[in-house]
Amino acid sequence: MQLRKAKKRDLSAIVRIYNASIPDGMATADTEPVTMEERQGWFASHQQPAYPLLVATAPNERHTLWGWGSLSAFYGRPAYAGTREVAIYIAPEARRRGVGTTLLTALIDEARQAELHTLLAYIFSHNEPSLNLFRQAGFAVWGHCPGVARNQGQAIDLTILGLTLSSAP
């Protein structure tokens, strides 16, 4: 597998991978599929070096996306400028192939190069594969929000994971 910065032509595959995560209720609080039009602004915001959007491609198939990961702004206030939210989504057919580990490692490296100090991940508490992925990368549980989401008539807990990259101001 190879990693690279996302390109405009990748948006349809990024949206497809994201939408594939909606029905099982494991990885997103969206309950209806998103459209490419709805994701245009989000995609544009991730074309800045400070907010990378990486894609993992299948071996020998540079245009077949196996997954994507991004670093997004956290809370939008100046004091949080050194903090990013991490998101990773893997195509169903590519799960359990190390795609998540590869993307997360690369995003942590990007964050360090950008001299960020903190990474946060918001993961549904029943999503053990994602919780394990982030724990293995050094993230720790920083918070637990019981029942903050509702999906298919069920209350869903949210776990907040964090990783301190540097304590320097």
Image: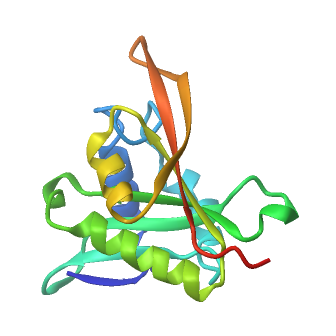
Tell me what residue is drawn at x 24 percent, y 57 percent: 91
Q: In the image, is 87 to the left or to the right of 84?
A: left
Residue in view at x 47 percent, y 53 percent: 140
Q: Quadrant of residue 137?
A: bottom left
Position of the N terminus, as image quadrant, is bottom left
Q: Is residue 17 above or below residue 137?
A: above
The residue at the far top in this view is 153
Q: Is residue 153 above or below residue 17?
A: above
* Residue at image coords 38%, 62%: 14
Q: Among all residues in the image, which is located at the extreme front?
A: 167
Residue 8 shows in this picture:
no
The quadrant in which the C terminus is found is bottom right
Q: Nearer the viewer, residue 65 or 36?
A: 65
**Where residue 32 appears, x then y in whole percent?**
44, 33
Query: Is residue 140 visible in the rendered structure shown here?
Result: yes
Pinpoint residue 90: horizontal percent, then vertical percent.
28, 58
